[in-house]
């Protein structure tokens, strides 16, 4: 063979390899099509910056084992371009590594570039320098903004193309999203909003990525962009074009938490009901937001007032462990949906309305049929008669019959275990006694006493002018008063109009007071009585942000810091005299000396200047440091911040995020068990009222070393570090549940089942940890049966049948099940 033939063969092989490795992703009005075949796609959101690279393989593997086909993630512009044209794709920002990890597990990916993301992320994912660009208007037809947005979007697309990660190149990414929930706010931008939305679509299409683009919550999305639905329920959603499939990009598995807010809880029954209804009504793509919520490390939490934990009550909890029974109940549903994929994507559809919110949907393909029986009544169970057979369908549930004869799944009947997570002490050392604390004050004399700043202006400026390089921004001015001043009285006060973030006030070096708000409150009035000295007085105000606004029309323009007015109020009898300081000469300083001096790092020159004597307690603005040993084993690690006020924490220089255990969650929790029936929203089934909003903070094991580790705290409010300790989290008890003729499965995840606290086969009731026997029960001693089958084993499986437990005296129509509580 001559050289020209070899060259031809070489390039032919290259072309053939590229051709067979590429995946064609198209769609019709029914479904996304992979290489020409209609598919149902079950996806889940996992945000790479809210975990660590070492966690990614385990999270993605669990998602795959849970029956997912795809992993969805946003791309976080402000994390990757914190300063204009300065990029960061290292560590947990390594987007390409994350996408390749998805590919390694054989899953698809959905890339939501945005680059506006919302996501309860700081400033909605926008870098704050964007706000400070001259002439800019964000999320509208503005050339400055559109140029920056196109630059970043193109950067991401080019990076992904270079690594051949789009499906058209043989990669895992089958869908990409441009913008995000713009339809919710487009009316606020008028005609310019419509122009901008169409520009987004055209710009995205021009990038030629070879896969479909989507827009969520955008009913006006132009073809070929697919518009999709976000919400707790999307079964009634209809795409804006008959050639677009019915897609659900955000099925909210729970909700986010805010400082002072209650813990959200969405039942496994309701979440499964929402999914089953969606597929019953013609849906073919569904994404869980979130499948793993994770942690808002550093200063990434938005809001303002979004907590550091972003657990979201997702199927995988904040630490990456299974959130049972939600994970298992959905896993079973996913398997059944996949088993009937061909029928529900190619079959003919018919329906039967039985009245009283009960209906059947039948998918028929050739000689195969699959049925969904739905009951959206919130209180009344239903009996459906189909082809001469009666089927019981509980209220607010969907039954799936893959052959239209046998019910294999009902959303209201959970046949998977429930895990009760417990926290265990750090067995590597005797904490908290073993933690030896050192400390140093946050030096604030230059600002609080001297008023020294970095810049000055004869006006109050918005804190976003700093490009959000720090939570902390100092406002300083001097006020010259004498006793002849008209405002001078024995009753003077300082009044500050704030933006809802934290304010600390100092006068002449003395602390005056602090104030803050809560989620959804964007302003307050701080007013305190004050005693000025004749002559010059130093007024220093420290603004501390708790995440920037991330959602809403023109959210980027909401004030941050101290917009004013800032006034001295004097009272003389009935007369009120106001001296407005807003136009005074103000000096400004960004950040804290301790952060500037990098006290969080052990190898920096200032790190040796710590004191071990006279440890201060409840002292405003104090740095604390200690060393600790990593807890033994592989269970997730948390640090208990009980006793502290509010501040920032680092382990070995890695930021754990903001802590605020002194912020107590509001009241409003019900003492009644949560009823899954009826529409869910984030005020239903809430928990943790009257307790610290967040007491425990995730410490990823990749942050720690095998030997000594360093914890550094900046305590902003004042607190007691001597109660701080490290703990591990694992299931303490597990509860099995299986309806009659199903298998009851228990697992202690590698640990041994040591005891059985409860077992009954009949009509027992209650929740895990508080089961009670009902009015009927099997003749055999269920406790003995389960003890013999399970104790001493890491896992066990027991059929919930009368052949195992004996006959019952339950009446006709009673739904029998096996309930077990075991100790790990």
Image (tube, rainbow, N blue to C red):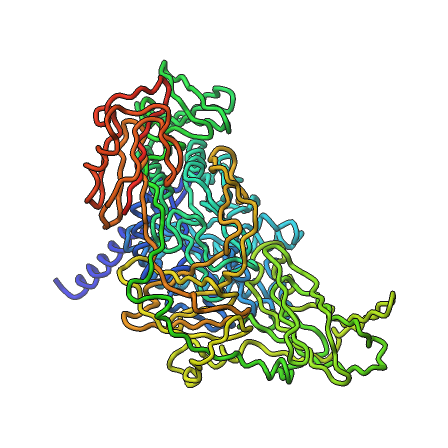
Q: Front-most of 146 and 570?
A: 570
Count the numbered circles shown: 0
Q: Could you tell me residue 198's position as x and y percent? A: 57, 52
In the rendering, at what x and y percent does residue 445 appear? Answer: 59, 83
Q: Position of residue 781 (x, y in %)?
A: 24, 29
Q: Is residue 152 visible?
A: no
Q: Residue furthest top?
A: 388
Q: Nearer the viewer, residue 581 or 719?
A: 719
Above or below for 507 versus 48: below
Residue with the most extreme right position: 574
In this view of the protein, can residue 811 be seen by the observer?
yes
Q: Residue at x 48, y 57 (%)?
A: 694
- For the N terminus, which image quadrant? bottom left
Q: Quadrant of residue 698?
A: bottom left
Residue 56: where, in percent of width, then height?
33, 58
Say above or below: 804 vs 689: above
Residue at 74%, 76% in the rendered image? 531
Residue located at (55% from left, 76% from top): 591
**In the orientation shown, which residue stands out farthest toward the left?**
1
Q: Which quadrant of the figure has residue 140?
A: bottom right
């Amino acid at each position: 063979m001559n050289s020209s033939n070899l060259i031809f063969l070489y390039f032919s092989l290259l072309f053939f390899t590229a051709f067979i490795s590429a995946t064609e992703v198209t769609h019709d009005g029914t479904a996304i099509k992979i290489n020409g075949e209609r598919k149902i796609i079950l996806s889940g959101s996992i945000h790479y910056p809210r975990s660590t690279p070492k966690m990614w393989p385990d999270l993605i593997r669990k998602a795959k084992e849970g029956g997912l086909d795809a992993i969805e993630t946003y791309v976080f512009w402000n994390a990757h371009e914190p300063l204009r044209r300065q990029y960061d794709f290292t560590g947990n920002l390594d987007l390409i590594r994350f996408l390749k990890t998805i590919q390694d597990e054989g899953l698809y990916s959905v890339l939501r570039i945005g680059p506006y993301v919302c996501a309860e992320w700081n400033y909605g994912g926008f870098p704050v320098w964007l706000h400070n660009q001259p002439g800019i208007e964000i999320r509208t037809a503005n050339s400055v903004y559109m140029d920056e947005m196109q630059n970043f979007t193109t950067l991401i697309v080019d990076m992904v193309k270079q690594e051949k990660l789009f499906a058209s190149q043989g990669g895992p990414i089958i869908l990409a999203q441009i913008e995000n929930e713009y339809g919710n706010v487009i009316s606020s931008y008028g005609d310019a909003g419509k122009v901008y939305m169409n520009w987004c679509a055209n710009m995205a299409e021009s990038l030629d990525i070879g896969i479909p683009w989507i827009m969520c919550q955008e009913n006006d999305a132009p073809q070929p962009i697919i518009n999709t639905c976000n919400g707790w329920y999307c079964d009634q959603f209809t795409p804006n074009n008959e050639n677009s499939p019915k897609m659900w990009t955000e099925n909210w598995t729970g909700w986010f938490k805010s400082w002072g807010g209650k813990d959200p809880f969405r039942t496994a029954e309701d979440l499964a009901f929402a999914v089953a209804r969606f597929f019953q009504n013609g849906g073919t793509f569904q994404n869980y937001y979130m499948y793993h919520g994770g942690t808002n490390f550093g200063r990434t939490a938005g809001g303002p007032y979004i907590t550091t934990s972003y657990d979201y009550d997702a199927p995988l909890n904040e630490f990456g462990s299974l959130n049972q029974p939600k994970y298992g109940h959905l896993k079973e549903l996913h398997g059944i949906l996949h088993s009937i994929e061909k029928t529900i994507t190619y079959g003919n559809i018919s329906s039967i309305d039985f009245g009283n919110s009960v209906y059947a949907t039948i998918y028929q393909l050739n000689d195969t049929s699959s049925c969904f029986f739905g009951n959206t009544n919130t209180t009344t169970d239903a009996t459906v008669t189909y082809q001469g057979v009666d089927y019981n369908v509980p209220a607010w549930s969907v039954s799936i019959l893959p052959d239209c004869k046998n019910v294999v799944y009902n959303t209201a009947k959970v046949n998977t275990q429930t895990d009760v997570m417990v926290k265990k002490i750090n067995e590597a050392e005797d904490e908290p006694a073993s933690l030896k604390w050192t400390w140093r004050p946050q030096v604030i004399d230059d600002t609080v006493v001297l008023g020294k700043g970095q810049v000055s202006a004869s006006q109050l400026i918005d804190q976003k002018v700093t490009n959000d390089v720090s939570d902390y921004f100092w406002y300083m001015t001097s006020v010259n008063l004498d006793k002849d001043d008209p405002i001078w009285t024995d009753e003077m006060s300082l009044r500050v109009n704030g933006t809802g973030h934290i304010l600390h006030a100092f006068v002449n070096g003395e602390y005056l007071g602090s104030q803050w708000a809560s989620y959804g409150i964007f302003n307050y009035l701080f007013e305190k009585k004050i005693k000025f000295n004749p002559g010059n007085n130093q007024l220093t105000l420290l603004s501390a942000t708790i995440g920037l606004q991330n959602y809403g029309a023109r959210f980027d323009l909401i004030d941050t810091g101290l917009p004013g007015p800032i006034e001295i109020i004097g009272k003389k009898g009935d007369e009120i005299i106001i001296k407005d300081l807003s136009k005074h000469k103000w000096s400004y300083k960004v950040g804290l000396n301790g952060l500037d001096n990098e006290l969080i790092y052990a190898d920096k020159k200032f790190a040796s200047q710590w004191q071990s004597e006279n440890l201060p307690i409840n002292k405003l603005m104090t740095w604390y440091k200690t060393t600790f040993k990593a807890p033994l084993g592989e269970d997730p690690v948390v640090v208990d911040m009980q006793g502290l006020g509010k501040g920032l924490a680092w382990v070995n220089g890695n930021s754990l995020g903001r802590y605020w255990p002194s912020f107590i969650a509001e009241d409003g929790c019900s003492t009644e068990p949560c009823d899954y029936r009826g529409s869910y929203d984030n005020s239903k089934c809430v928990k943790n009222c009257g307790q610290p909003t967040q007491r425990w903070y995730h410490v990823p094991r990749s942050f720690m070393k095998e030997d000594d580790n360093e914890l550094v705290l900046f305590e902003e409010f004042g607190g007691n570090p001597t109660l701080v300790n490290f703990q591990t989290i694992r299931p303490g008890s597990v509860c099995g549940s299986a309806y009659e003729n199903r298998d009851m499965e228990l697992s202690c995840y590698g640990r041994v089942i040591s005891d059985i606290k409860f077992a009954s086969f009949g009509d027992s009731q209650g929740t895990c940890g508080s089961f009670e026997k009902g009015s009927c029960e099997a003749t055999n001693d269920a406790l003995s049966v389960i003890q013999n089958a399970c104790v001493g084993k890491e896992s066990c499986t027991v059929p919930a049948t009368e052949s195992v437990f004996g006959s019952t005296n339950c009446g006709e129509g009673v739904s029998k099940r096996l309930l077990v509580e075991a100790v790990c």
